[in-house]
Amino acid sequence: MGAGKIERIASLSARFWRNAESAPTGV
């Protein structure tokens, strides 16, 4: 299946969680 799509989602997820960790508000 779309390996590139999975990689893209993983990248976005990592970026999102990184921002959530640094920001006091998880929104």
Image: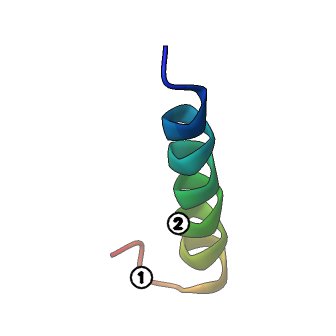
Residue that badge 2 annotates: 16
Q: Report the side of 22 relative to 5 (left or right).
A: right
Q: Position of residue 3 (x, y in %)?
A: 60, 27
Residue occupying the far left of the picture: 27
Q: Foreground: 10 or 19?
A: 10
Residues under numbered marks 2 and 1 in contact, where contact means CB atoms less than 8 Å apart: no
Nearer to us: label 2 or label 1 = 2
Q: Position of residue 15 (x, y in %)?
A: 61, 67
Q: Position of residue 24 (x, y in %)?
A: 52, 85
Q: Which secondary structure, mark 2?
A: helix
Q: Report the side of 18 relative to 26 (left or right).
A: right
Q: Which secondary structure, mark 1?
A: loop
Q: Report the side of 11 relative to 6 (left or right).
A: right
> How many numbered discs?
2
Asked if 18 appears above or below 25 in the picture, the reply is above
Mark on residue 17? Answer: none
Q: Foreground: 12 or 22?
A: 12
Q: Which residue is drawn at 53% across and 59% down?
A: 12
Q: Residue at x 65, y 57 (%)?
A: 14
Classify 10 Å Cα crowding around label 2: few (below 14), some (14-19), many (20 and above). Answer: few
Q: Where is residue 7 in the image (x, y as percent from the top left)?
A: 63, 41
Residue that badge 1 annotates: 25
